[in-house]
Amino acid sequence: MSIARNEFEFKSLKLRENETIEARLASSYHMHLVNHNVPYHGSFTLTNQRIIFFSSLVTPYYQFIDFENIEFGMLRIKPENSTQDLIVSSHGEKHYFEFFHTTSLVSMITNLKNHIQIID
């Protein structure tokens, strides 16, 4: 799938009234199924109301997590491959996002801490 189509599908997403995008980074979302882990590579978007993950590698896939439903977030640094995991617990389910460590990530995490409790 081309990047242009990916951008078009993401931009066609309707934001809520008074919802604004605060940060957007490339990431992986790791969906845990019964016996294995399925990584989706896509875009992690932080708005002033929720987290949106979007991927369109095979078919469009969206994951929406409202801040009001998040119990906590946890950061885990993996120095062996310069990545950082963000684990978000919502309704008792854990969502795993993986990012390469960048200054944009540091800024996004700072913004996220304004909305939810992050355990470092």
Image (cartoon, helix red, strand yellow):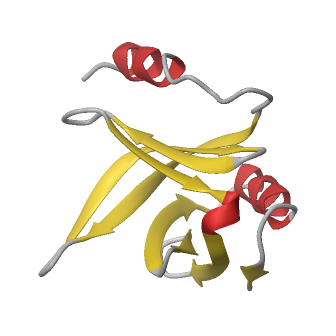
Residue 104, position as x, y percentages in the image: 74, 49
Q: Residue at x 70, y 56 (%)?
A: 105
The quarter of the image holding the N terminus is top left
Residue 55, position as x, y percentages in the image: 36, 39
In the rendered image, the vertical position of residue 98 relative to residue 35, given as above or below: above
Total numbered labels placed on residues in the image: 0
> Residue pushed farthest bottom?
120
Q: Quadrant of residue 75?
A: bottom right
Q: Residue at x 50, y 74 (%)?
A: 91
Residue 28, position as x, y percentages in the image: 42, 56
In front here: 89 or 87? 89
Q: Quadrant of residue 32?
A: bottom left
In front here: 51 or 85? 51
Q: Residue at x 77, y 32 (%)?
A: 20
Q: Residue at x 15, y 79 (%)?
A: 34
Horizontal side, residue 57 vs residue 102: left or right: left
Horizontal side, residue 30 vs residue 19: left or right: left
The quarter of the image holding the C terminus is bottom right
> Residue pushed farthest left?
35
Residue 42, position as x, y percentages in the image: 42, 43
Horizontal side, residue 114 vs residue 23: left or right: right
Horizontal side, residue 66 vs residue 83: left or right: right
